[in-house]
Amino acid sequence: MPENNKPQQAKKIDLAVKSALWLGPLKSQAKASSQKGSQPGSQLGKMQQPKGQLVDVLVARGRIVSVAPVGSLDVHAAKEIDARGLLLLPSLTDVHTHLREPGQEYKEDIASGLCAAAFGGFSNLLCMANTRPVNDTASVTEFMLEQARKSWPDGPRLFPIGALTKGLRGEELAPMADLKAAGCMAFSNDGRPVASTELFRRAMEYCQDLGRVVIDHCEDPWLAPAAGVNEGEVSSRLGLAGQPDIAEAIQAARDVLLAEYLGAPIHLAHISCEKSVAIIRMAKARGVDVTAETCPHYLTLTEDEVAGYSSSAKVNPPLRPRSDVEALLDALADGTIDMLATDHAPHAAHEKEVEFDAAPCGISGLDTALATSWELVRAGKLPFGAFLRAWTTAPCQRFGLPVNTFAPGDPADFLLFDQDATWVVDPQTMKSKGKNTPLLGRTLRGRVVAHFLAGKSIV
Amino acid sequence: MQWKHKDLLDISQLSADEVRHVLATAAYFREINSRPVKKVPTLKGRSVVLFFAEPSTRTKTSFDMAGKRLSADTFALAKSGSSLTKGETLKDTALTLQAMNPDGIVIRHGSSGAAQFLAERLECSVINAGDGRHAHPTQALLDALTLSRRWGGDFAGKTVLILGDIAHSRVARSNVLLLNLLGANVRLCGPRTLLPPRLDTWPVTVFSEVAKAAQGVDAVMCLRLQLERQQAGLLPDLREYARTFGLSPRHMALAAPGCCVLHPGPINRGVEIDSGLADSAESLILEQVENGVAVRMALLYLYLTRKSPDAAQSGIPV
């Protein structure tokens, strides 16, 4: 290791973060430790949080120079941070958010959404196209990117998702080559899934030519669309029209069959139930180019949240029974579900404070996603390696985004995380304009203390 | 018994003792309703808003009459004449009504949970007169009063069949809870398309054939079939429904001796119930209506006087 460090020490170091706790393998040690089978990602079933080690992180020109055991590097940095007691994590990537701008800035705007992302631990954000107007023309994409540059010039980075069809109407393809040129990183009809399988097929083909992945919100258009509550014990008791889990699984099956037939990639958004997991598992075994995400709320909450007609727990797809939660955790741990995303869906308080039937679907997630998903790692329900994969490498690889694996040359996007800090989810302190979360008033553990993006402090 | 509840949202809030207390109080008001002069000063000076955001004739009239017989002032607010049709939210309607300081609000609303939504925001008592598919506790209580009178107050070991469109029925949901609470066995029967999901989690036995379901039962509750279920693709047509799930005298022949028939009304003659059966001696449909006024008098009395220190001790002032 000293040999390795010599050339690095010759560089001008802009930032040194000292004595942070790192739970993963060091890049120079990765090979050795994987031979021993002790790499965190391979600890399925063990379910114990790795003990980790204290490290120093060196950054120059926005990139990682070195991560090494504490004190092993003798450097003089322009800026030094004492990170004792704090956990080192790479910044997270969220491939599924709704930032509402243009058109519904009272729910959220790009500035407030990026603020929630910065404080929530996210460096890369993909935002859905169901704005007003819809992001189906290059000028809308350019506007979004301009709003991001103006409000948060040093990031978090915004990557718009273009509409798959004009106006999300599911009738004609959107001009996706234009949208790609303007900066769209993926395409989706999220919010208004394409009902016509023929049109969806053509959209997948067209996207494949562009080298872009189609993201599908799997929901049968006729089986109780957007009910916001699972069809099951709770909906039956409350007298609410619920949506059965097969509404998602049927469409997931359609999508993976199309992907296999076409040899085209597909990404399945916010998977919520065991039946969809089984379909994805089968498709992956057949070599289909499918990836899938789930959200922290599907891993931590059940349909019981709706029991008091709580519209803050009304979300599409709906929260499911405990057995689905368990299946999703297993699927995320074993890689059947590749990644996590928030499906951050902010709404104004007055929109949610209505009869359950009348409330819009959606949970505001950027403020709470890291703490709630970290709680799964702490509880031994999600291996640390799977956590890292789900929030960093898997989404970045799938959508072609910069990712920090703490290897030399990686973008210096990382967090210092106080995993023991407790805080109450409070509308006053949430950064998102959307306070619509069933977690309101609950105490969470784990806060971002500092967030560096390309080596610059943004929090 | 000092009444401790602010609101009546669903039967699940009540204990068996509380239900018996409601029924006993209602029996008392039934007696008043048989007098030549049916008005008592019990709730003089109290005001009750009847907020019916869904069409209703009998329940609204029943509450109106109940309030007036107790000398309360009742104020009716219908959806067509209210600001709800002008885009006002339920919250704002509720706060507006609250600002007028009523002692109670009776709400009928098409959304499940609407009564609870109101109750969480208002200081006055909220009585649920039917919210979506969720609950209709006053209907269940009047049904219980009707059966209680028929059975001499003893529900233990009795079996009640609820027949028809269970999925969309708040009457069925509240009755399942109440009949179980009082110790009766509950059977449900209806086409699969009109049954709610996960009935395995309900305290009921489910049948798909009326002839089997009716075997040995002590009472049958028929539910109104909303005609729009056909358009929604849940039924082929009313003729077939009437033939397969309508209650007929041949089913009554399979039931226990003395089996009675109930219906929350309004009835579709010849659809969910044979027309002659509705008018027969077994039919308690009109007694249900009569008991409805008494039960609602009892509920208005209990909920609106719960804070009066002497209410429990001094009995019902007449």
Image: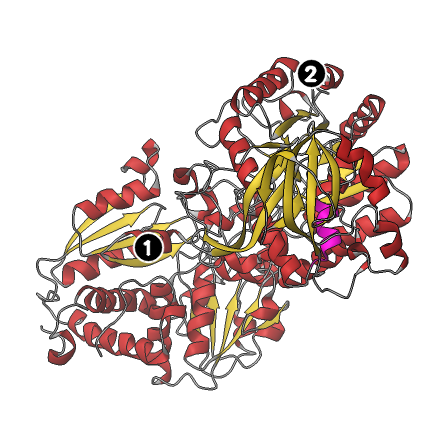
The residue tagged 2 is: A182
Disc ID at residue B120: 1
The amino acid marked with disc number 2 is Ala
> Mark 1, mark 2: which one is toward the viewer?
2
Q: Does residue B58 appear left or right of residue A395 in this picture?
A: left
Q: Which residues are magenta?
A: A382-390
Secondary structure mainly formed by the magenta segment: helix
Q: Is residue B112 above or below residue A326?
A: above
Residue B21 % position (x, y): 27, 78
The amino acid marked with disc number 1 is Glu
**Is label 1 in a helix, a strand or a loop?**
helix
Residue A9 % position (x, y): 76, 35
* Subunit under mark 2: A
Screen quadrant of the C terminus of chain B: bottom left
- Which quadrant of the view contains residue B281? bottom left
In the image, A367 versus B80, the foreground residue is A367
Q: Is residue B26 visible?
A: yes
